[in-house]
Image (tube, rainbow, N blue to C red):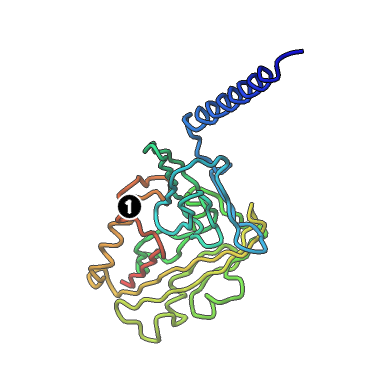
């Protein structure tokens, strides 16, 4: 019969070896390249009993951050609360590991927005077109979608086409959004509630748009000119000709639709 002490010692040694191998495996997994991903580059708002939240496919210790502002992200887990985020924009997600290693990815929170732009009514530039999924070339899903759901924007005077989300700016002025006799630097915030026939399954979404009225370019407020210059210089929130810029200047919402009468 074998010595019981030898059996016990052998068991302890085997257990310790297995534990050591397990620790080494976990360490190697943690030290490997981190694939920061949310499963897709476009994330859709979904029907949910509470807030709709999407988490990284793989979690890693460290901190998570979203850019530009407008995205609700958990610093510790990287979970994105899409229900409480500004949709229609492209965001950069950054993970900083405990050893300082930085990993990034970019995601679009599906929805619509509008270009920050001057619209010159005297030059027949009078329709603001919605941008879908942060890309001007993306085809907006018109069939089955609803824009200005509930009629809130139109009831305020903002002429939003319920079939395609386009804003008729000339008609908006005629409807009296800026008053019966519009004056320079009049600003109005309008919320557009919409439901898109796409991966969101027509979940209710919304966008706040800020509309301005000026008689001419010469009367545009200096602070607004600066805002437009900053936004048009680039940003991660729209694709195409837009490039990344400093985080201090990245304040993409609400989109500024600026009407120039003459």
**Secondary structure type for disc 1:** helix
**Please, is residue 181 above or below residue 74 in the view?**
below
Residue farthest toward the right in the current orientation of the protein: 1
Q: Nearer the viewer, residue 171 or 28?
A: 28
Image quadrant in which you'd find residue 221: bottom left
Considering every residue shown, the one lying at the far top of the view is: 1
Residue at screen point 40% across, 71% down: 211
Viewer-nearest residue: 42 or 160: 42
Q: Quadrant of residue 257?
A: bottom left
Q: Position of residue 147 (x, y in %)?
A: 58, 66
Which residue is located at x 55 percent, y 53 percent?
Answer: 110
Q: Which residue is mark 1?
A: 247
Percent from the top left, x then y, of residue 190? 47, 73
- Front residue of 87/116: it is 87
Q: Position of residue 186 (x, y in %)?
A: 34, 78
Above or below — where is 9 with respect to 232?
above
User: In the orientation shown, which residue stands out farthest toward the bottom?
Assistant: 180
Pick the quarter of the image with the C terminus: bottom left
Judge from the rendering whether residue 251 lies leftward or rightward of residue 47; answer left or right.
left
Left or right: residue 128 compared with residue 165: left
Residue occupying image coordinates x 31% and y 48%:
245
**The N terminus: image quadrant:** top right
Horizontally, residue 5 falls left or right of residue 20, namely right
Above or below, 54 relative to 190: above
């Amino acid at each position: 019969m074998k010595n019981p002490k030898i059996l016990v010692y052998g068991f302890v040694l085997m257990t310790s070896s297995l534990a050591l191998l397990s620790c080494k495996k976990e360490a190697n997994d943690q030290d490997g390249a981190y694939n920061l991903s949310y499963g897709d580059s476009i994330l859709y708002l979904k029907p949910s009993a509470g807030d709709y939240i999407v988490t990284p496919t793989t979690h890693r210790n460290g901190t998570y951050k979203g850019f530009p502002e407008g995205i609700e992200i958990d610093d510790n887990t990287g979970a994105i609360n899409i229900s409480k985020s500004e949709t229609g924009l492209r965001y950069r997600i950054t993970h900083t590991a405990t050893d300082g290693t930085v990993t990034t990815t970019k995601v679009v929170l599906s929805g619509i927005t509008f270009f920050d732009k001057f619209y010159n009514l005297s030059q027949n530039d009078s329709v603001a077109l919605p941008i879908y999924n942060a890309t001007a070339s993306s085809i907006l899903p018109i069939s089955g979608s609803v824009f200005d759901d509930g009629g809130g924007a139109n009831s305020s005077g903002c002429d939003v086409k319920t079939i395609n989300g386009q804003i008729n700016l000339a008609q908006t002025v005629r409807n009296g959004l800026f008053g019966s006799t519009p004056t320079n630097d009049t600003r109005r915030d309008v919320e557009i509630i919409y439901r898109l026939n796409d991966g969101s399954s027509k979940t209710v979404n919304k966008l706040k748009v800020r509309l301005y009225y000026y008689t001419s370019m010469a009367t545009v407020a200096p602070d607004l000119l600066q805002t437009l210059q900053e936004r048009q210089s680039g940003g991660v929130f729209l694709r195409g000709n837009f490039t990344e810029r400093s985080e201090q200047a990245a304040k993409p919402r609400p989109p500024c639709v600026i009407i120039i009468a003459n």
